[in-house]
Image (cartoon, grey):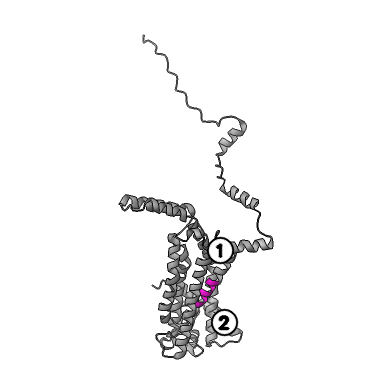
Amino acid sequence: MDLLLPIKWLIELVLVSFHTVFTFLGLGSAEGITWVLSIIGLTVVVRAALIPVFVKQIKSQRNMLAAQPELQKLQKKYKGKTDRDSREKFAKEQMDLYKRTGSNPLSSCLPLLIQMPIFSALFFTLNDAQHSIVSGKGGVGLLNLDLAQAFASSNLFGAPLKDTFLSSDLLEVKILAAVMIVAMTASQYITQKQILSKNQNPATQSSQYMQTQKIMLYVFPLIFMISGISFPLGVMFYWLASNFWTMGQQFVVIRNMPTPGSQAHAAQQARLAKKGKLPKAEEVAEVEAEEAKPRQRVQPASKARAKTSGTKPSTPAAKKPAAKKPNTPKK
């Protein structure tokens, strides 16, 4: 059973829909530009659908940064304690901290993990399409045999979209693939770099979370360089468009929703002050004080009514023991 079948069907639906629009506008069905624009359209649809996940990721990352001081105290508390009981206590208190602050250490990987099945389904969809000339079969959905063969014969700047850097001997394929790998690597590096340099609080620079982010700064570009040479050009266009979407998305977030205490936050405050839109210190203090107030516990309705009436809440009367009959002497 093909677990990716539903995702492949949806990918073909979106891909063929965009292809139909572009052919209606006058582009050729088998032209490479038509399929590239259709793949970019698919990328836009997928990334737009993931915006709620991205917003949740941002909130979780902010909570994670806010929890770092407490996490560091917890790590110092159990530093050097390697016995089983201490490890279990540390793990429990750490999970309680994450639950209390609403943070998740894996939140930064969530959009990527969700996209992996989509990326895999697109890879197999285009891979099946490139063999349609030999197999005589179309896709699993709207990508019929004619459209599959149109993709298999399409090329951009003389480079067939079905070819990979490793499998092709054409110079056009190797040049286009190399340019795209460099562009993917650079866009990923720039995205991660602007997060680390502009959108982080200096107080959390030495935290474990930040150390992980710094490692990812070099790991992800390295992954693109190694794996990019084995993917078809059509799949690489999806990957490249997705990276550019991420870079633009992060730019918007850093500019409009920066991390408090970061360089981007200071720049935002300066822009607001210049426009006269910066809130007054008194207003900020009032908001912070209101948020810091503990919420009043709601009492049950019966107790609340009893307080207003000045009487104690009624309780069910206890049953009185039955009176014993006096013993009468027998005659």
The reply to whether the magenta stretch includes residue 242 is yes
- Give above or below for 69 relative to 164: above
Q: Residue 195: x and y, percent?
A: 51, 67
Tag shown at residue 58: none
Residue 40 falls in image quadrant: bottom right
The residue that label 1 is drawn on is 263
Quarter of the rendering occupied by the C terminus: top left
Which-is-in-front pick, marks 2 and 1?
1
Tell me the kind of residue under disc 2.
Thr
Check contact, mark 2 vs mark 1: CB within 8 A: no
Residue at 44 percent of width and 87 percent of height: 174
Q: Residues within 10 Å of mark 1 (few under 14, many from 20)?
A: some
From the image, give the main secondary structure of the stretch colored magenta: helix
Residue nearest the viewer, comparing 127 with 61? 61
- Residue reaching furthest right? 276
Numbered range of the magenta stretch: 238-247
Q: Residue 159: x and y, percent?
A: 48, 88
Tag shown at residue 20: 2
Tell me the kind of residue under disc 1.
Gln
Q: Residues within 10 Å of mark 2 (few under 14, many from 20)?
A: some
Residue at 62 percent of width and 34 percent of height: 308
Q: Residue 196: x and y, percent?
A: 50, 66
Residue at 61 percent of width and 63 percent of height: 268
User: Which badge, 2 or 1, is on the more N-terminal residue?
Assistant: 2
- Residue reaching furthest top? 331
- Give above or below for 15 relative to 97: below
Q: Is residue 142 left or right of residue 266?
A: left
Where disc 1 sits, the SS reads: helix
